[in-house]
Image: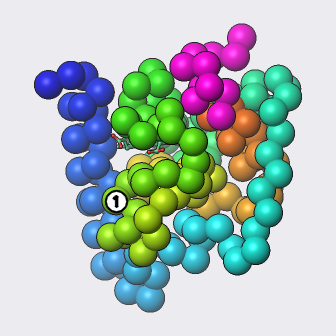
Amino acid sequence: MKMHQKLALICTATLALTTTAAHAAKPAQLDDGLPTTLRPANYKAKYPTDNAAIVRGEKLFRSDKLSTNGRACSNCHAEASTFGPNFTKPYPHPAMNSQARFGVPKLHLDEVVQVCLQGPLRGTPLEWGSPEQADLVAYLTYVQKTGKMSAR
Ligand code: HEC
């Protein structure tokens, strides 16, 4: 088994555990916090592509600022290959068992960020259109396009 497959297995288990815990604590918020995971109705995404935004996004990705358990996105995603087999395909695309978990066949990039943020990082979902969301999406789009984890 390749390293990234092992990582995916471990991480999927973590996601499942987190989901179970959240369900037990808050039965009213089933489906991984559906209202905040999926884009609000009529949401128009406008994300930056400039280098400053990419660099800010990378900093956020490598920090534990968004988590409540000291984790950073980069703990699990140290290389572009850790984002899974569909990552290089244009968004929205099938991801994270979205049909079973969220009732939609595909997820947008800003939506998969919300899933990882609320799951492994146990963080508060990002506000739609917030600067943090914009910067993270800018950075991840850069990684998706270039396969590089650092903009510097
Ligand atoms: C505990 C490990 C873990 C942490 C921490 C984590 N992720 Fe993930 N992430 C995963 C797993 C597992 C997948 C699914 C990989 C697969 O499909 O093989 C994934 C997938 C993704 C994908 C690609 C989804 C797709 O299929 O297009 C993105 C983008 C992503 N994560 C962003 C983030 C961001 C941003 C953070 C920090 C807020 C983060 N991740 C933190 C485990 C993690």
Residue under circle 1?
97
Q: Outermost residue toward the bottom?
A: 28
Question: Left or right of 149: which side holds 141?
Answer: right
Amino acid on which disc 1 is placed: Asn
Left or right: 106, with 4 as reference point: right
Q: Which residues are magenta?
A: 141-152
The relative height of residue 115 versus residue 51 in the rendered view (above or below) is: below
Density class for disc 1 (Cα within 10 Å; few <14, some 14-19, many ≥20) is few
Residue 49 seen in render: yes
Asked whether residue 149 is drawn in magenta, I would say yes
Q: Is residue 76 visible?
A: no
Q: Secondary structure at mark 1?
A: loop
Say which quadrant the C terminus sits in. top right
Q: Which residue is more in the foreground, 25 or 102?
A: 102
Q: Residue at x 24, y 31 (%)?
A: 5
Q: Quadrant of residue 90?
A: top right
Which quadrant does ligand 1 occupy? top left
Question: In x, y percent, where is residue 54?
Answer: 75, 28
Q: Which residue is at a point 27% across and 60% down the rendered structure image?
A: 17
User: Residue 39 at x, y = what percent?
Assistant: 65, 67
